C-alpha cells in the first residue's frame, strides 16, 4: 500500500493547460473536533479520489472520498458513528487578486490535501451527530441517559435540581 500523504507537489505533475489528471491515493486524516468532542476517522487514511484539471491560468480540483467517523453522541455522549460521502471542489488561479479564486490549500505549487480533506469532512458532519435519530438525551436533573429508562418511571418529585435545595434555605436579606 502506498504511503499516506498530506501534500501534493503540483509542479511535479507537469500538467499543461487543458490537461487533467486523476489520482487515487491514501490521505492521512487527523481526528476532528466538534463542540468539544473528538471524532475519529476510520480508516485513518482513507483512499481519496483527486481530479486535477488545468484551465488556463490555474488549477481546479475535485476531491471525493467516503469516511466513517466515530465519537460521542452530541446529546447523550454514548458512542455514535456516521458514514459521510465527501465531495468538495477548489479552484486556484494564478495572477488574481480575487480571493474567491485563490485556494487556501495551495501554497507555492503545493496542495495541502491533508488539511483540505480534514476541513471538508468537518463541514460534512451534521449539526446533530446522534447515537440514534430519536436519542432522548440526558435527564436535566440527574444527568442519567433517558434512552434506557421509561420516561414515566424516570421522574423527580421536586422537578428541581437537588443542588438547588441548599440554596433554597439561604436567606437573602
Ligand atoms: Zn444519544
Ligand atoms: Zn433524572
Image: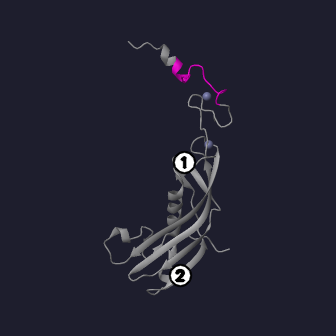
Q: Is residue 109 visible?
A: no
Residue drawn at (68%, 36%), measured in percent from left and top? 148
Residue 13 part of the magenta segment = no
State the image coordinates of residue 33 (x, y, percent, origin top left).
53, 52
Compared to residue 127, the image places residue 6 above or below, namely below
| Label 1 residue SS | loop
Give the label on residue 21, or none: 2
In the picture, the quarter occupied by the C terminus is top left
The residue at which mark 1 appears reads as 128
Residue drawn at (50%, 83%), measured in percent from left and top? 20
**What is the span of residues highlighted in magenta in the rendered image?**
151-165
Q: Is residue 168 left or right of residue 41?
A: left
State the image coordinates of residue 37 (x, y, percent, origin top left).
55, 47
Q: Nearer the viewer, residue 169 or 138?
A: 138
- Mark 1 Cα shell of 10 Å, populated few (<14), some (14-19), many (≥20): few
Compared to residue 153, the image places residue 89 above or below, namely below
Compared to residue 104, the image places residue 153 above or below, namely above
Q: Most extreme residue toward the bottom, as rendered?
A: 16
Compared to residue 124, the image places residue 131 above or below, namely above
| Label 2 residue SS | strand
Amino acid at each position: 500500500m502506498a504511503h499516506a500523504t498530506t501534500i501534493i507537489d503540483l509542479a511535479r505533475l507537469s500538467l499543461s493547460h487543458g490537461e487533467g489528471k486523476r489520482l487515487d491515493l491514501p490521505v492521512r486524516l487527523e481526528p476532528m473536533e466538534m463542540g468539544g468532542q473528538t471524532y475519529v476517522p476510520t480508516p485513518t487514511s482513507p483512499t481519496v479520489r483527486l481530479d486535477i484539471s488545468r484551465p488556463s491560468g490555474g488549477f481546479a480540483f475535485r476531491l471525493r472520498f467516503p469516511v466513517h467517523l466515530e465519537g460521542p453522541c452530541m446529546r447523550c455522549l454514548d458512542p455514535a458513528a456516521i458514514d459521510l460521502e465527501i465531495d468538495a471542489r477548489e479552484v486556484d488561479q494564478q495572477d488574481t487578486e480575487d480571493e474567491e479564486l485563490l485556494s487556501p490549500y495551495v501554497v507555492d505549487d503545493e496542495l495541502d490535501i491533508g488539511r483540505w480533506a480534514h476541513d471538508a469532512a468537518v463541514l460534512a458532519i451534521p449539526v446533530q451527530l446522534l447515537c440514534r435519530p430519536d436519542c432522548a438525551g440526558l435527564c436535566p436533573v440527574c444527568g442519567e441517559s433517558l434512552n434506557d429508562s421509561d420516561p414515566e418511571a424516570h421522574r423527580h418529585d421536586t422537578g428541581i435540581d437537588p443542588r438547588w435545595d441548599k440554596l433554597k434555605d439561604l436567606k437573602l436579606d
